[in-house]
Image: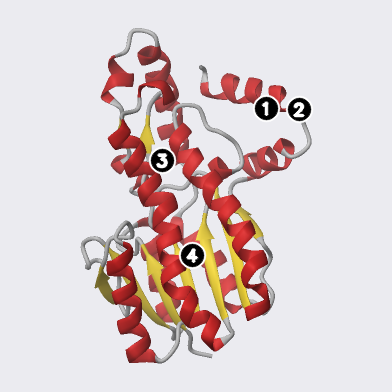
Amino acid sequence: MRKIIIITGASSGFGKATAELLASHGHTVYGLSRRGSGCGEGVKEVKADVRNAEGLRAVVAEIVATEGRIDVLVNNAGMGIGGALELATEEEIDLQMGTNFMGCVNMCRAVLPQMRSQRSGKIINLSSIGGVMGLPYQGYYSASKFAIEGFSEALAAEVKGFGISVTLVEPGDFATGFTASRRNSEASLNDPDYGPLFRRSLGLIEKEENGGLKPEVLARRVARIVDSRKPAMRYVVANLEQWASVALKRVIPGRWMVSILRDYYKC
């Protein structure tokens, strides 16, 4: 059945691949992005900033007025800031948390009144394996994704009775434009203590990302969730090593995980 779907961050990476695939399956897909363009063939493009709650409510109201319902929300919009936690500026922290976490919150709050009134809907929130383990020199990115995890768990409990499901998708490393667009802290790069460690870790991070899975892999997973009658709460979408690391994190002592991460990221 044709569904009315909203996808944020739809002009590149996961968002674009997912929007194009779902549109090719016959769904009506609204792709939101700050540019309002480049979302792919068959996608209805909308210019919107997920940090602007009022603007998002207006966009959702217009979609509801046109389509009469909203069946699926895919919260994909996000960005990354690399650097030492200690040296991040307030502006960097606000941008990271405001885009990744509050962007997700703003979109959920915008669509939930309609989904509640129709007593149906799916919310798919893009988290990360960085949302289940704190990644060195990507700490505020991890914090934003940890926040999405907790928010989504609570939301799932609150809205299940209204016929609304909430699902978390936790990607590992993927080859997308995310790597090139990451903002790296100048203070961290130039710091005599953190600088050498950050540069070394950053080289490993970028190598893994650039050699990662293609975004179409995640798009196919999201499409299956859209079609599923009873989707699971979480899906890890990653290579075998990263999938195993998520499973390991759940059973080993925390200090062991810190040691593993320090060794992996050479910090």
Please give the name of the residue rendered at 41% of the width and 50% of the height, measured from the top-left corner: 100
Secondary structure, mark 3, is helix
Distance between mark 3 and mark 4 Cα atoms? 18 Å
Report the amino acid beneath label 1: Met
Pointers 2 and 3 in contact (CB under 8 A)? no
Residue 4 placement (x, y as % from top left): 44, 83
Seen at 49% across and 50% down, the residue is 213
Q: Closer to the N terminus: mark 2 or mark 4?
A: 4
Disc 1 vs disc 4: which is toward the camera? 1
Q: Label 1 belongs to which residue?
A: 257
* Among the two numbered marks 1 and 4 on one chain, the one whose residue lies closer to the N terminus: 4
Q: Which residue is mark 3?
A: 210
Q: How far, Cα to Cα, is label 1 from label 2?
A: 7 Å
Q: CA distance from mark 2 to mark 3?
A: 31 Å
Q: Is residue 243 visible?
A: yes
Residue at the image point whose x is 28% and y is 60% from the top? 49
In x, y percent, where is residue 67? 38, 90
- Say which label, 3 or 4, has the lower sequence index: 3
Asked if residue 128 shows in the view, the reply is no
Asked which secondary structure carries label 1, the reply is helix
Location of residue 33 by image quarter: bottom left
Earlier in the chain: of badge 1 and badge 3, it is 3
Check contact, mark 1 vs mark 2: CB within 8 A. yes
Nearest to the observer: residue 186 or residue 59 = 59
Q: Is residue 51 above or below residue 147?
A: below
Give the residue at mark 2.
Answer: 253
Q: Nearer the viewer, residue 185 or 176?
A: 185
Residue 219 disc label: 4
